[in-house]
Image (cartoon, rainbow, N blue to C red):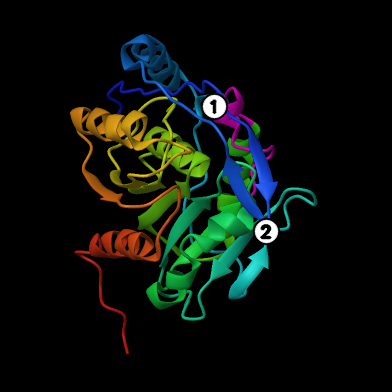
Amino acid sequence: MTETGFSGSGRRVSRRHFLAAGAVTITAAAVAFDSERMAGSAGMRSIRRQQGTPTVEEGRLLARPVAPKGEGPTGIQPLGLDGRRDGLLFVPTTYRRDRPAPLALMLHGAGGTARHGLDLLLPLAEEAGLILLAPDSRGRTWDVILGGYGADISFIDRALAQTFDRYAVDPERLAVGGFSDGASYALSVGITNGDLFPHIVAFSPGFMAPGGQVGMPRVFISHGTRDEVLPIDVTSRRIVPQLQRAGYDIDYREFDGPHTVPPDIAREAMDWFNAERSDATPPSS
C-alpha cells in the first residue's frame, strides 16, 4: 500500500437536477479546484489511517476478492440489499468459476438509477466477459457530493462483498467508473482506494474529492467539447493536468459532443481496459 498525500477537491456553485422523459438533466454546474488547501487535511487523513483501521468517513472500502463460497446466476439480477434503493449486477453467460472474471463498479449520474450505471458498458460486457456491478446511490446523488463519505461507501462495500462472495473476480482487473456525478465519484473513490481498483474510468467528470491517495491506478477520462452541463474547460481540462502532476498514468479523450457517452468512446474505454491484460492468459477454447 502506497500513500503519497495527494488530494483534489471540487466545489459546486449551483446545481439543479430533474428527470425529463426518463433522462437525467443537470441545468447548471461549475467546479473549482484548490489542491493546496486540501493537502493538509489529506495528510491528516493519511496519518489517521496509518494509526488505525480505515474508516467509511475517509471513503475507504474494505471488501476484497476472495474464493467464492457460493455459485451465483448469470444475467442481470437485483442486488437484494435494499428494498428502496438497491442496485443491479450483470454476469456474462461466459462466466466460469474456475476463470476469475474482470469486474467494473459502474456509477450513475445525478438523479439516475443503477440501470443508468449498468447501461454505460452493458452492450460490451458480454463479449468482454465483464461483470458489471451498478449500485443505486442512497440519495439523489453520491454522498461525497452532498457533503461527505458515508452511506454510499457503506452500501458499495456491502455490494462488493456480496459479489466477491458469489463470483470469482480477478483482483488485477477491477475498475470503478461512471458518468457525470458518477464519474466524479469514481475518480474520488478510485484514488482513495487504488489498492482495490487498478483502473478508473470517468466519462465527463465534474471534480474529484478523494479522502486521500492509496496506490496509483491507471485512469481513462473522456469529455465532450460542447458539454454545457459540466463545461470541459473547468472540469476535465483541469482534472487531467492535476492528476498528471501527481504521477498518474492518464488516457484522455476529448470528443466533439455534449454531455454524453458516445458508443465509440465507451468502446475505447473498454479497449483500454482490455489492453491492460498484457500478462493475462488467453481463454481456453
Question: Which residue type does callout 2 highlight?
Answer: Leu
Circles 2 and 1: CB distance less than 8 Å? no
Is residue 145 highlighted in magenta? yes
Is residue 252 highlighted in magenta? no
Give the residue displayed 61% in from the left and 48% down from the top. 24
Q: Residues within 10 Å of mark 2 (few under 14, many from 20)?
A: some
Label located before the other in sequence (2 or 1): 1
Question: Which residue type does callout 1 highlight?
Answer: Thr
Q: Which residue is mark 1?
A: 55
Which of the 4 image quarters holds residue 21? bottom right
Of 281 and 258, which appears nearest the observer?
Answer: 258
Residue 143's x, y, as percent? 60, 31
Residue 114's x, y, as percent? 62, 54
Question: Is residue 72 visible in this depiction of the protein?
Answer: no
Residue 2's x, y, as percent? 28, 31
C-alpha span from label 2 to label 1? 24 Å
What span is in magenta? 136-150
Helix, strand or loop under label 2: loop
Q: Which mark is residue 79?
A: 2
Compared with 219, 67 (above or below) is below
